[in-house]
Image (cartoon, helix red, strand yellow):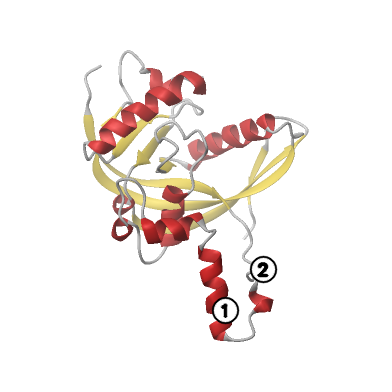
Amino acid sequence: MTERFARIDARTVRLTAAADHKPPVLQPLASSFGALQKLEELESLTSGRLVVQQKGLPGIAPDMLAAGYGHTYINASFSYRRPGGNRFNPPDWGAWYCAFTVETALKEVAYHLTRALENCGAAYDNTTRYRELLATFADSFLDLRDAAPRPDCLDPDIGKAYPKGQALAARLRAEGGNGIVYPSVRHDGGTCLVAFWPKLIRDFQQGEIWILKWAGDPTPSIEKAKA
């Protein structure tokens, strides 16, 4: 397959599980501002995101991580990885996955959470709220949208696709590549993008909240949360 790169100028959406903000669990233990600082230092020892912000990741030094508005969401996507990695990132470094439309993003997260419920033997009884994270890209990406024949890394079978995709991503990232734009495997006609570097994420903004509810069936109901 001849590799083709394309400049992507697009506003994209990423969905991340959302939790209502609550006071830190340890906050009642802090009798003073100094004590609170000590508790925050204790928290940093177990927070994957804070550890990464201090020590960096393979290929990403601490000063290459995001700063300013939205940096916690951005850096978290690179800090927290699934044990086996994902389609285009191995277990030792994370990436920013997003889609060109919220419909595609919803199909993707619904598939993966359904799979997680199945793998842990849980009943289809779950409600998860997802927050839109909006970002703009204006850079060159490896373009797999019209690749022929269809590459193995886009196979619906994770066992076949992930090793191929992770190898491709590792090589491309080592060469300084920005990431990959590719057809969604879970939403016909949809387009996804994976970015390897925090610096590529521009004009970050939080968007709507979506509620996905499993009630005894592997296909969840999906609705937008009321304002």
For badge 2, the amino acid type reads: Val
Q: Return the x and y of residue 68 as percentages of the image width and height.
A: 37, 67
Locate the N terminus and report the quarter of the image it occupies: top left
Give percent across and percent down for residue 89.
40, 36
Amino acid at pointer 1: Leu
Q: Which mark is residue 185?
A: none
Left or right of residue 167: residue 2: left
Q: CA distance from mark 2 to mark 1?
A: 12 Å
Q: Is residue 62 above or below residue 120?
A: below
Q: According to the image, label 2 marks what residue?
A: 25
Report whether 92 appears left or right of 1. right
SS for dot 2:
loop
Q: Position of residue 222 (x, y in %)?
A: 64, 41
Q: Residue at x 30, y 15 (%)?
A: 148
Height in image: 102 above or below 61? above
Quadrant of the rendered structure where residue 6 is? top left
Q: Position of residue 122 (x, y in %)?
A: 74, 34
The residue pinned by badge 1 equals: 36
Instruction: Please give left or right for residue 202 compared with residue 110 in the image.
Output: left
Q: Secondary structure at mark 1?
A: helix
Q: Quadrant of residue 31?
A: bottom right
Q: Earlier in the sequence, mark 2 or mark 1?
A: 2
- Quadrant where the image shows the C terminus: bottom right
Residue visible at 49% across and 54% down in the picture: 48
Task: Give the camera-side residue of 49 and 188.
Answer: 49
Q: Camera-side residue: 71 or 5?
A: 71
